[in-house]
Image (tube, rainbow, N blue to C red):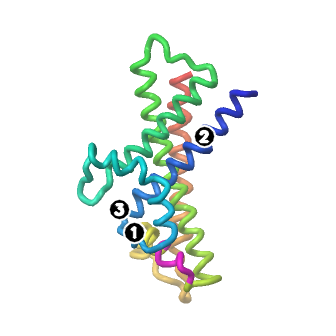
Amino acid sequence: MSNQILIFLLDTVLGLFSLALLLRFYLQLLRIPYYSSLSSFLIAVTDFIVRPTRRLIPGLGGMDLSTLLLAWLSQCIIVTSIYVLQGGNLGANIGSTFSIMALLALVEIIKMTLYIVLVMIILQAVLSWVNPQSPLAPILDGFTRPFLDVFRKYIPPIANIDLSPLFALIVIQLLLIIVGNTQLEIYTTLF
């Protein structure tokens, strides 16, 4: 029972920190303005570790690689700790076990990214009906525009209703199924 509590706490705390790092990475990548309270919060929560890491790992083409690497490393810690707490043995084949853990952490980052986009699209759709002038609207629009523009190119609005979020959500759900199956296959090689 104590292992379950440790797993829950570790997954929650480090998972939320990884989410904050990933959101910071995407807000910087998509050039979302920093004047919002969300951006300020993400910077305040993650700056203590991102600034020193930036000195070691420079950005590349507008991407903050240090923030992305930190999100991946926190997922590596989560996956490895859960494996050990569930009775997994790092033992003799430690190199291959760590490479599998690194791959699982990458899959978790991809899954978390898909969930971020899914939630952002749903929030944007709800806010467009309830309060289109919300302070969150520009952030959500800037975040979801690159994903929705792919569908808007081929699917015109019908009676002034934009159906691109619906199709984007369907594609994201399909991708989540693929990622979940990939994650399951990796887990079966581990156990």
Q: Nearer the viewer, mark 2 or mark 1?
A: 2
Q: Give me the C-alpha separation between circle 1 and circle 3.
A: 11 Å
- Position of the C terminus, as image quadrant, is top right
What element does badge 3 sit on?
A: helix
Q: Nearer the viewer, residue 48 or 165?
A: 48
Neighbor class of circle 3 (other Cα within 10 Å; few <14, some 14-19, many 20+) is: some
User: What residue did someone put label 2 on?
Assistant: 11
| Residue 137 x/y as whole percent | 52, 78
Q: Amino acid at mark 2?
A: Asp
Q: Which residues are magenta?
A: 134-140
Q: Specify whether 28 is left or right of 167.
A: left
Q: Label 3 is placed on what type of residue?
A: Leu
> Is 78 inside the magenta-drawn segment?
no
Task: Label 1: state its secondary structure.
Answer: helix
Whole-percent x, y for residue 63 in the image: 30, 56
In the rendering, which numbered label is found on residue 146? Answer: 1
Residue contact at pointers 2 and 1, CB within 8 angstroms:
no
Which residue is painted at 27% across and 47% down in the image?
Answer: 55
Marks 2 and 3: in contact by CB < 8 Å? no
Q: Nearer the viewer, residue 191 or 132?
A: 132
Depicted 184 relative to depicted 139: above or below: above
The location of residue 172, given as percent across then percent down, is 52, 58
